[in-house]
Amino acid sequence: MRFAEQVVLITGAGSGIGRATAGLFAAEGAQVVVLDIDGDRAAETAEALDGAVALTLDIRDLAAAATVVDQVLADFGRVDVLVNNAMRISAGELDERDDDADMLDELDVDLLGAFRMTRVCLPAMRRQRRGAIVNVASVNGLGYFGNDVYSAAKAGLVSLTRSVAARHGRDGVRCNAVAPGTIATPTWTERAELEPGFLERMGSYYPLGRVGRPEEVAEAIAFLASDQASWITGVTLPVDGGLMTGQVVMARDLTAGGA
Ligand SMILES: NC(=O)c1ccc[n+]([C@@H]2O[C@H](COP(=O)([O-])OP(=O)(O)OC[C@H]3O[C@@H](n4cnc5c(N)ncnc54)[C@H](O)[C@@H]3O)[C@@H](O)[C@H]2O)c1
């Protein structure tokens, strides 16, 4: 029970990795606050968990984020862990986008949303002289795997992780990130239903030979948020089946023929 009596806020916990993370924290004793722009999905996550509560929140709205944290402090008295997990992703690379609105919105959710949530949680964490923040970045923030606006936002999260860690370590606040590779969340399982073999094909690019499961990312998030990681701050941990180790397909090609 690593998180007994700890209050844990998770954005985007109405689906996928956020939902699995909510489940793990709840199983380890946390008071979980499930946050999502989709109130029904947030409620569905919370209903399946012991004592979890669901609140509707759009992380593009700083005032709404502040109100949610005020409510959490009034109800539970503290904020121990913040997991910045919510995201939206839209199709189209830079040269295929005709207007700014969609790009701005993607950055607003995927990057500035985490800035806002961090901003509104930090005062309580600093008062407590204890807090752990985990940002859910992506391998897209470390290298190019398509979706360049999303990737830029994720690279921004890696930078935010370092800034908060460096600036607030003396306040007792740690900040780390995970960088998942392809995880079998609804986005990809729904595509696999239309395109049989998709997940197996993606899995073949990974040294470990398969895509990841939401629960495997949740384990890494919980570790970084826990006291077991008490001397770790400012890092981005790939949770990627070895994808960032290098170009396996290229290496096979290079070394073919006995080189
Ligand atoms: N699934 C993958 O393969 C993968 C790979 C690398 C990184 N990630 C990252 O993991 C995290 C979770 O991904 P997922 O696949 O579980 O996502 P998902 O799409 O299943 O869930 C994202 C959730 O965020 C919520 N959300 C969207 N906009 C919001 C807003 N403005 N305010 C509050 N909530 C909002 C959605 O309603 C949804 O419930 C994301 O940060 C994503 O970038 C996922």
Image (spheres, helix red, strand yellow):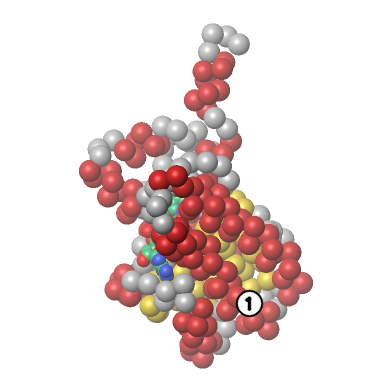
Left or right of residue 122: residue 24: left
Q: Nearer the viewer, residue 50 or 87?
A: 87
Left or right of residue 194: residue 56: right
Q: Nearer the viewer, residue 177 or 110?
A: 110
Task: Using a 10 Å C-alpha cutoff, classify the residue at mark 1 as few (fewer than 14 neighbours), some (14 to 19) or many (20 or more).
Answer: many
The answer to which quarter of the image holds residue 80 is bottom right
Q: Nearer the viewer, residue 34 or 151?
A: 151
The answer to which quarter of the image holds residue 6 is bottom right
Tell me residue 228's x, y (percent).
64, 61
Tell me residue 20's x, y (percent).
41, 61
The answer to which quarter of the image holds residue 35 is bottom left
Q: Residue at x 23, y 45 (%)?
A: 193
Tell me residue 136's x, y (percent).
52, 58
Residue at the bottom extreme of this rendering: 74
> Vertical placement of 72 versus 86: above or below?
below
Tell me residue 166's x, y (percent).
74, 64
Q: Which residue is mark 1?
A: 122
> Vertical placement of 148 versus 224: above or below?
above
Q: Residue at x 51, y 91 (%)?
A: 74
Q: Secondary structure at mark 1?
A: helix
* Label 1 CB less than 8 angstroms from ligand 1: no
Left or right of residue 85: residue 91: left
Residue 106 in view (yes/no): no
Ligand 1's quadrant is bottom left
Tally of numbered tags: 1
Q: Residue at x 39, y 37 (%)?
A: 202
Q: Quadrant of the C terminus?
A: top right
Q: Residue at x 53, y 46 (%)?
A: 139
Residue at the front extreme of this rendering: 98
Residue at the left extreme of this rendering: 194
Residue 232 in view (yes/no): yes
Residue type marked 1 = Leu
